[in-house]
C-alpha cells in the first residue's frame, strides 16, 4: 500500500527489465536487433509493459498477463492477483491501450481458454481493440492471438507458439521445427540469486527512491512564495491524487437527499437523510438537535466523521431512544451515558450534531475476510482511486448535503474527526467552503502512515495540507501537535 503513495507498483519490477536489455546488448553473442521478451502470468504483465515502453524489444509474447478492466473490476478477477501485477492507474487507462503501444512491432497475445484470472472473453476484447491500431499501421500480420486449451498453467503448447513467433520475427525462420519446447534447462535452485536476502536490501522501500517524492516544504519568505507552494500542492492533488473523482456534470451540484427517518425522544429530534455520493453509492447523514429548537434557529452544525468504531458508538448512544432507523443493525450494548452527553451539549448550546460514515464503514461496511478487503482496495487503484481518496469525496458530498438543507444554508459547520478519518476530513476541507472550524484528533504525522492516497507523496504530505487548511479555517489539533511543525 505504501507504494501507491509514491505512484508505482508494477513499475518497481518492470524497471529491472531495461537493465537486462542493457546487459544483453553488451554480450558479443547477442544480436541487438533480435531481442524478444516473453513471460507468463506476472512475467506476462512485465512483458507487456517493457515491450510498450522500450522499442529495443523487437518482438513480444506476453502469456496470460493481461485482460481488460471489465474483467478485473466488474468480474472481480483482480482478487486472484497480487499487487505486483498492476501499476498505479493514475490516468485510468484500460489495458488495451498498453498493448497498443507495442504496435507495429510483432506482438503475440497468448492465453489459455480456461484461465480464471485472465478470462478468454476479456483477452479477446483486448485483441480486438489492439487490432484496430495495427490495422492503422498496415501491420496486421504482426499481431497474433493464440488460445490453447487449459487453465492458468504453463503448458507446452504455449511454449511452442512462443518459440515459433520468435523464430519467425527475430530469425526469419518461420518453418523451423521446434524440438525442445518445454525443456527446462536449469532446475529452480540454480536460478536462485540469493540464499538469503542481503542485510542492505532496498527492495522493500524502493518506491521511496524509484519515484521522487515532493521536495520538503519550506517556510515561505513572502506571501507570493506561500501562494506558489499552496497552488502547486492543490493543483498536484487535483491532477495526480484525486484525478479519479467523478467528473460527471451532475456531480457539480449538491446531491439530492431523501429523508428516511424523523423522530423525537427525550427532548431530542433525530433526522436521518440518505444521499448519493455518486451513482450506486448511497450514504446516510444523521442529524441530532434539540426538539424545542427549529433547525433554522441553530447557530452551527458540528459534523463528526466516523469509522466502524464511531458507528458502534453512535448505535450504542442512539438506539435505545431511536430504535427504528437502526433496526437492521447487529445488537450492541446500549451506552446511555453517550446520549446524556450529547443531550447536555444540545441543551447548553444552539448547535446541531451530525454524523457521517464514508463508504465501506458503519452501516455500509463491506463484508468479507481480509483477502476480500484487499481485493476491494485493488479495484479502486485500477480505477485511478483509493478507498481513502473516495472517502474524501464522500465527505465533500456530505458537507454539500448538510449545507443544502434549506434551514442550514447559511450556518457555520464544524468538522470533527479522529485518526485516519482526521486525514480524510482535512483534505475534504481543502475542496469545500463554509467550514469554520476543523477539530482533528491524533492526525498521523505523514502519509507513510495514512491516509492512503495515490501519488500523494509526489505532491506533498500532511503538514503541508494542514498549512493550507489553516489558511481557510480555524484548525484545532489534539493528540499529535508534532504534525503542525511546518
Image (spheres, grey):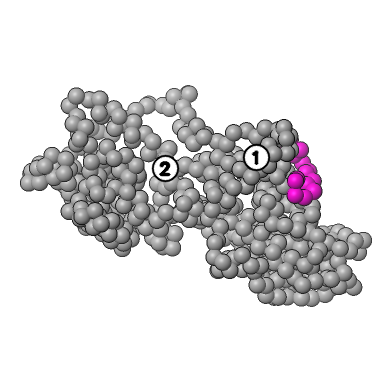
Nearer-the-camera pick, 234 or 175: 234
Magenta region: 470-483
Nearer-the-camera pick, 103 or 164: 103
Left or right, residue 79 beside residue 400: left
Q: How far apart in space, not on screen, are marks 2 and 1 (Cα)?
A: 31 Å
Left or right, residue 341 beside residue 96: right
Left or right, residue 281 beside residue 157: right
Location of residue 237 in the rendering, given as x and y in whole percent from the top left corner? 59, 48
Residue beneath disc 1: 229
Location of residue 434 in the rendering, given as x and y in whole percent from the top left corner? 75, 58
Q: Is residue 383 above or below residue 282?
A: above
Marks 2, 1: nearer the viewer: 1
Q: Residue at x 62, y 33 (%)?
A: 216
The mark nearer the N terminus, 2 or 1, is: 2
Location of residue 66 in the rendering, given as x and y in whole percent from the top left corner? 34, 52
At numbered mark 1, what does the secondary structure look like: helix, strand or loop? helix
Q: Residue at x 59, y 59 (%)?
A: 360
Residue farthest to the right, as pictured? 348
Q: Quadrant of residue 144?
A: bottom left
Q: Residues within 10 Å of mark 2 (few under 14, many from 20)?
A: many
Q: Is residue 50 above or below residue 263?
A: above
Q: Is residue 230 above or below residue 268?
A: above
Q: Is residue 378 visible?
A: no
Q: Is residue 371 above or below residue 124?
A: above
Residue beneath disc 2: 10
Q: Quadrant of residue 449?
A: top right
Amino acid at each position: 500500500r505504501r507504494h501507491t503513495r509514491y505512484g508505482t507498483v508494477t513499475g518497481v519490477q518492470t524497471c529491472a527489465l531495461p537493465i537486462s536489455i542493457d546487459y544483453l546488448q553488451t554480450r558479443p553473442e547477442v544480436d541487438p536487433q533480435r531481442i524478444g521478451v516473453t513471460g507468463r502470468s506476472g512475467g506476462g504483465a512485465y512483458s507487456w509493459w517493457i515491450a510498450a515502453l522500450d522499442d529495443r524489444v523487437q518482438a513480444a509474447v506476453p502469456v496470460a498477463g493481461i485482460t481488460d478492466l471489465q474483467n478485473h473490476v466488474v468480474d472481480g478477477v483482480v482478487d486472484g492477483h497480487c499487487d505486483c501485477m498492476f501499476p498505479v492507474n493514475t490516468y485510468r487507462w484500460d489495458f488495451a491501450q498498453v498493448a497498443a503501444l507495442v504496435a507495429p512491432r510483432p506482438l503475440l497475445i497468448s492465453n489459455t481458454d480456461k484461465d480464471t484470472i485472465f478470462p478468454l472473453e476479456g483477452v479477446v476484447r483486448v485483441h480486438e481493440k489492439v487490432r484496430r491500431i495495427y490495422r492503422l499501421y498496415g501491420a496486421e500480420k504482426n499481431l497474433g492471438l493464440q488460445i490453447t486449451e487449459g487453465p492458468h498453467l504453463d503448458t507446452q503448447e504455449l511454449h511452442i507458439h512462443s518459440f515459433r513467433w520468435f523464430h519467425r520475427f527475430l530469425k526469419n525462420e518461420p518453418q523451423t521445427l521446434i524440438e525442445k519446447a518445454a525443456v527446462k534447462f536449469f532446475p529452480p535452485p540454480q536460478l536462485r540469486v540469493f540464499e538469503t536476502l542481503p542485510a542492505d536490501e532496498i527492495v522493500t522501500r524502493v518506491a521511496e527512491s524509484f519515484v521522487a517524492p515532493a521536495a520538503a516544504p519550506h517556510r515561505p519568505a513572502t506571501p507570493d512564495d506561500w501562494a506558489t507552494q499552496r497552488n502547486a500542492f492543490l493543483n498536484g492533488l487535483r491532477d495526480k491524487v484525486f484525478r479519479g473523482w467523478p467528473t460527471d456534470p451532475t456531480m457539480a451540484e449538491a446531491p439530492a437527499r431523501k429523508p428516511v427517518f424523523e423522530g423525537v425522544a427525550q427532548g431530542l429530534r433525530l433526522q436521518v437523510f440518505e444521499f448519493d455520493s455518486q451513482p450506486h453509492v448511497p450514504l446516510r447523514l444523521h442529524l441530532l438537535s434539540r426538539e424545542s429548537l427549529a433547525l433554522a434557529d441553530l447557530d452551527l452544525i458540528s459534523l463528526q466523521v466516523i469509522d466502524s468504531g464511531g458507528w458502534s458508538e453512535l448505535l450504542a448512544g442512539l438506539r435505545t431512544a431511536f430504535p427504528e432507523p437502526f433496526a437492521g443493525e447487529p445488537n450492541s450494548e446500549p451506552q446511555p451515558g453517550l446520549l446524556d452527553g450529547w443531550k447536555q451539549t444540545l441543551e447548553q448550546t444552539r448547535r446541531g450534531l451530525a454524523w457521517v460514515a464514508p463508504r465501506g464503514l458503519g452501516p455500509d461496511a463491506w463484508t468479507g475476510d481480509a483477502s476480500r478487503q484487499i481485493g476491494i482496495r485493488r479495484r479502486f487503484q485500477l480505477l485511478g482511486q483509493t478507498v481513502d481518496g473516495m472517502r474524501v469525496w464522500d465527505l465533500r458530498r456530505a458537507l454539500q448535503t448538510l449545507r443544502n438543507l434549506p434551514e442550514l444554508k447559511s450556518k457555520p459547520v464544524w468538522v470533527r474527526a479522529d485518526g485516519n478519518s482526521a486525514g480524510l476530513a482535512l483534505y475534504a476541507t481543502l475542496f469545500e467552503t463554509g467550514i469554520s472550524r476543523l477539530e482533528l484528533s491524533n492526525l498521523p504525522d505523514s502519509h507513510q502512515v495514512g491516509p492512503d492516497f495515490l501519488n500523494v507523496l509526489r505532491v506533498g504530505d500532511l503538514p503541508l495540507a494542514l498549512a493550507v487548511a489553516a489558511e481557510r479555517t480555524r484548525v484545532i489539533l489534539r493528540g499529535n501537535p508534532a504534525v503542525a511543525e511546518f
